[in-house]
Image (cartoon, helix red, strand yellow):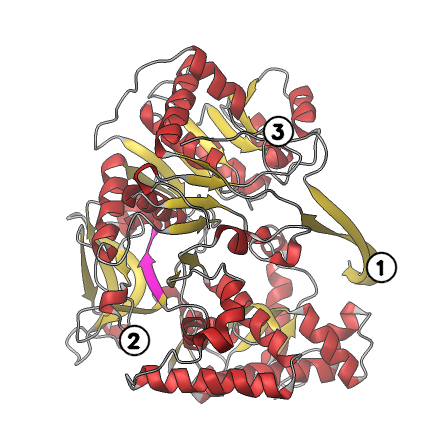
């Protein structure tokens, strides 16, 4: 059986007081900092995993679920999430996904629209799911109570609030299936596997309908791009949201090649949030690391921040080796890796020391960060795909590396460019450019209960209009450089690409996250940023600004000018044109989350943005190694050290 968590907390909480802007007033508030203490990874062979999946599938049937039902999955990435999804598939039960970062309204949208009769939910998310469940068709709730984020008491409180529901833990469900086994009920290729909701960047999230055939074609198609450079000896850390097609395709691809999956979490990747144990990367020692731009930006900033605190000798040694490797790699000179073990070895140890290559997905990354990670950590590849295409579109391959593009097209897809003359993109140009359209087995069938959006997205002959703009290079590899809706016509008639600019500005040391705003009535854009508080805190001390007052740090003209110059310097180093360089910056006080960004009054944002762009700007806005038999390869997961342990024998 699986490990059982202890009743005590799975993390150490330390409280610190910080100054924060609350409803326009500076208040001293208490903030909790979490430090985790975890065991090493435990492993399941594929045979053990299959048994677990079939038992959970039998348990679902015993609870009364049939192929007519839909199971909503709302939880963090874990072995519980993926095994429940496969268990549902074993009985032809469709799943519906939701990001674990959603608030009640976001969960309610997908839960109610799809009329789910059952829900899988992590115990720490029960409070978020409680009200949406009351408004839904859900009769059965499966609770994963074995997460490191559970504080205790959530399940009992939920049971008391929902006496009419059938509530079981995931382990009880597995045991129910073990005691009442039934044969699998295989799905037909055209049966619905999943309704996966998009992130909702252009309005309410839309549910993309993915068939069993589409997922299998998508995963095996991606495999053809990398089959010559991966093997069943790969160890890949799983920590991105499984509710995102990028992670779902990745984990199924790892299983397809027989590799090892180790389940981690963004909060436990490094040693920074750990006590008496290593972070997930050092503990698991992955051979391939997959991430999104914000993860890679954080890694780069963490390394460069440590360098700033180092001695002049060490800094000169690092950047000397970095510049040599960049020059040698670009010019294909020998001995490009001459200083790897001496200079970059300590950095690579932080990622486990076995990294062969890294991969970026989900959105574009700045060239500066891509080059930094490639030279210091491991070569970075890229992937491009969408929810609607099962992550298919283009995938980088070490054997077909293109520095100026993503890579080849997976074999199950056709990709074409459609001219956008009104935006200046032509397929007849020397380098063909246009909107990317994709066709093939991995493409969704429709958006759930949304015929209007389906008609906009799919042509009668099956082409999906991605809304992304791209070009093909001489090797036929795809490069994606923006979205149609991210292009803004400026006052002078030129277009700028917001996503491209955000990827550059996000790499600035003083920035944690950024939104670039532009409009046709002005000649240059401005930036709204969530700051890197540590960098601003240190700069405030240097400039004589009260670093203990968060609001003052964010509004002081010296600080705003510092951040703006930081942004403008990055723009010039990246070779941006003058109309792409931000002319003003707004520093926000609150941390950006999926909930609070949507609750900020639109009128308030517009007023602030216009203030940045117009003359007479107020002072706040400035212008200027597990060893295992890979024939029975395994899935790793971590638990709290006080959990009852199970020795798993191969």
Q: Give the main secondary structure of the magenta stretch.
A: strand
Q: Residue at x 49, y 74 (%)?
A: 344
Of tags 2 and 1, which is closer to the observer? 2
Of tags 2 and 3, which is closer to the observer? 3
Task: Mark 2 or mark 1: name the one nearer the start of the chain.
Answer: 1
Q: Which portion, as a residue range, is magenta?
A: 381-386
The reply to whether residue 209 is in sight is yes
Q: Is residue 611 magenta?
A: no
Q: What residue sits right under mark 1 in the picture?
A: 28
- Give the distance between the C-alpha atoms of the residues marked 2 and 3, in whole angstroms: 51 Å
Secondary structure at badge 1 equals: strand
User: Observer-nearest residue: 156 or 41?
Assistant: 41
Q: Is residue 7 above or below residue 258?
A: above
- Give the distance between the C-alpha atoms of the residues marked 3 and 1, in whole angstroms: 41 Å
Q: Residue at x 35, y 51 (%)?
A: 234
Q: Is residue 93 above or below residue 180?
A: below
Q: What residue sits right under mark 3 in the picture?
A: 644
Task: Mark 2 or mark 3: name the one nearer the start of the chain.
Answer: 2
Secondary structure at badge 2 equals: loop
The reply to whether residue 128 is in sight is no
Task: Mark 3 or mark 1: name the one nearer the start of the chain.
Answer: 1
* Mark 3 crowdedness (10 Å alpha carbons): few <14, some 14-19, many ≥20: few
User: Observer-nearest residue: 219 or 558?
Assistant: 219
Residue 192 picture location, percent across and down: 29, 32
Q: What residue sits right under mark 2 in the picture?
A: 404
Residue 175 picture location, percent across and down: 49, 17
Do tag 2 and tag 3 residues touch (Cβ < 8 Å)? no
Of tags 3 and 1, which is closer to the observer? 3
* Mark 2 crowdedness (10 Å alpha carbons): few <14, some 14-19, many ≥20: few
Residue 134 picture location, percent across and down: 58, 26
Please indicate whether residue 126 sits to the left or right of residue 618 in the image: left
């Amino acid at each position: 059986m699986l490990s059982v968590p202890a009743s005590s907390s799975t993390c150490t909480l330390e409280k610190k007081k910080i100054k924060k802007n609350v409803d326009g007033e500076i208040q001293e508030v208490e903030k909790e900092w979490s430090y985790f203490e975890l065991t090493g990874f435990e492993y399941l062979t594929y045979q053990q995993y299959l048994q677990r999946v079939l038992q959970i599938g039998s348990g679902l049937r015993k609870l009364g679920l049939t192929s007519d039902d839909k199971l909503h999955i709302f939880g963090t990435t874990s072995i519980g999430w993926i095994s429940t999804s496969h268990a549902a598939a074993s009985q032809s039960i469709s799943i519906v996904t939701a990001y674990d970062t959603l608030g009640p309204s976001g969960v309610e949208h997908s839960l109610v629209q799809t009329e789910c009769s059952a829900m899988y939910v992590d115990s720490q998310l029960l409070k978020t799911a409680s009200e949406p469940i009351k408004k839904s068709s859900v009769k059965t709730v499966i609770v994963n109570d074995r997460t490191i984020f559970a504080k205790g008491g959530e399940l009992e409180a939920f049971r008391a609030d929902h006496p009419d529901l059938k509530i079981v833990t995931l382990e009880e469900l597995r045991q129910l299936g073990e005691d009442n086994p039934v044969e699998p009920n295989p799905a037909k290729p055209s049966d619905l596997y999943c309704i996966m909701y998009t992130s909702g960047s252009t309005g309410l999230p839309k549910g993309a309908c993915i068939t069993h055939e589409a997922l299998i074609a998508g995963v095996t198609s991606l495999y053809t791009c990398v089959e010559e450079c991966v093997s069943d000896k790969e160890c890949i850390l799983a920590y991105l949201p499984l509710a995102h097609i990028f992670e779902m395709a990745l984990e199924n691809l790892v299983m397809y090649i027989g590799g090892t999956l180790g389940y981690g979490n963004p909060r436990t990747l490094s040693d920074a949030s750990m006590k008496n144990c290593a972070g997930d990367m050092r503990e698991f020692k992955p051979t391939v690391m997959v991430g999104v731009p914000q993860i890679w930006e954080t890694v780069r900033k963490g390394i460069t921040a440590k360098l700033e605190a180092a001695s002049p000798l060490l800094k000169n040694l690092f950047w000397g080796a970095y510049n040599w490797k960049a020059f040698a790699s670009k010019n294909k000179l020998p001995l490009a890796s001459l200083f790897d073990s001496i200079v970059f070895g300590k950095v690579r140890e932080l990622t486990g020391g076995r990294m062969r290559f890294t991969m970026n997905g989900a959105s574009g990354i700045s060239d500066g960060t891509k080059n930094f990670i490639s030279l210091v950590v491991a070569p970075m590849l890229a992937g491009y795909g969408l929810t609607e295409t099962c992550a298919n579109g283009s995938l980088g391959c070490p054997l077909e590396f293109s520095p100026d593009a993503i890579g080849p097209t997976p074999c199950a897809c056709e990709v074409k460019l459609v001219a956008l003359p009104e935006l200046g993109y032509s397929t007849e140009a020397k380098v063909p450019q246009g909107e990317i359209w994709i066709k093939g087995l991995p493409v969704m069938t429709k958006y759930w209960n949304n015929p209007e959006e389906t008609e906009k997205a799919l042509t009668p002959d099956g082409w999906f209009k991605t809304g992304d703009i791209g070009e093909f290079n001489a090797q036929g590899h795809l490069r994606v450089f923006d979205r149609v809706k991210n292009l803004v016509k400026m006052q002078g008639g030129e277009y700028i690409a917001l996503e491209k600019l955000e990827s550059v500005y996000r790499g600035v040391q003083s920035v944690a996250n950024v939104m670039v705003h532009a409009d046709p009535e002005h000649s240059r854009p401005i930036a709204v940023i969530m700051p890197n508080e540590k960098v601003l805190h240190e700069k405030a001390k240097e400039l004589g600004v009260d670093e203990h007052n968060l609001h003052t740090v964010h509004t002081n003209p010296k600080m705003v000018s510092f951040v703006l110059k930081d942004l403008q310097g990055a723009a010039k180093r990246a070779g941006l044109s003058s109309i792409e360089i931000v002319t003003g910056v707004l520093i926000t006080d609150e941390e950006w989350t999926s909930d609070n960004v949507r609750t900020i009054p639109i009128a308030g944002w517009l007023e602030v943005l216009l203030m940045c762009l117009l003359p007479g700007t107020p002072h706040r806005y400035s212008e200027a190694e597990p060893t295992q038999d890979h024939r029975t390869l395994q899935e790793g997961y971590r638990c709290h050290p006080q959990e009852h342990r199970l020795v798993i024998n191969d």
